[in-house]
Amino acid sequence: MKYCSLIILFILFSCGNKEDILLPKSNVTAVSDIVDHSPIYIFFRTKEKDTLVEVNKKNEIISTNWIFNIDKRLPLQLVISEVMKLQDKKRKEVAHKNDDAKNYYSYADSIHKNLAFLPFTEVVYKLEKPKSGLVIFFDKHNEITVNNVPVKRADLRKYLSSISNENSNVLQFCFAKNMTYGGYLQNEIFIQSSVINKITKEEFVY
């Protein structure tokens, strides 16, 4: 099934009802095209002063690639809790399991004016602090610390290289639970596009 016209689907969703998802944006394209997919939508909702998530997974097919279309305004902790449930469901599937089926986050490519996709199939999320390793923490203000030492974004790769000989611990990528999902995805794109050596599949949200 060819991936096309998804931008229209964000607006005209189910029975003609208008549904808006504000996607994160980036000027970097990780993956530009996906075939044989199922869309999953995670909407931004409010009730009085509370922010809520609403998951629509009516079109999910276990054997296909899953594309997660998530509103960038949602708090990361709420998003990851739902993503973890869906990951677990897909990983435990036996009857229709397809080892080649991947999971992707969608976002808007601001340069080419189309959709782009970030793979995260192998990521294992944990809602806790890591117990060891070099802790690279991204906070909600877009600041970065490495074991509590502030590091400029432009200097992160160089800084990690400078201490690699002194400390052989695995890099642990951690994110503030109260940052927005949009902020998280931009950090994920930054990590991958910076070719930072990410050995572990774990990511921590707390």
Image (cartoon, rainbow, N blue to C red):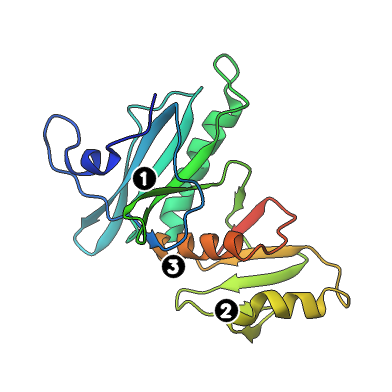
Residue 93 placement (x, y as % from top left): 57, 23
Q: Which amino acid does label 1 sit on?
A: Asn
In three-dimensional space, the C-alpha distance between marks 1 and 3, rounded to whole angstroms, equals 19 Å
Q: Which mark is residue 153?
A: 2
Residue, x 68% and y 74% (percent of image)?
157
Q: Nearer the viewer, residue 75 or 29?
A: 29
- Look at the image and tell me whether residue 75 can be seen: no
Q: Mark 1 points at which residue?
A: 69
Residue, x 19% and y 31% (percent of image)?
14
In the rendered structure, the answer to whether residue 81 lies left or right of residue 113 reads: right
Task: Count residues near mark 2 (Cα–Cα under 10 Å), then give few for <14, some for 14-19, many for 20+.
Answer: some
Q: Which amino acid does label 3 sit on?
A: Asn
Q: Nearer the viewer's eye, disc 1 or disc 2?
A: 2
What kind of element bears circle 1? strand
Q: Name the residue under label 3.
A: 178
Q: Which of 82 and 189 is in front in this view?
A: 189
In the rendered structure, the answer to whether residue 91 lies left or right of residue 162 reads: left
In the rendered structure, the answer to whether residue 200 lies left or right of residue 125 reads: right
**On screen, residue 44 above or below 176:** above
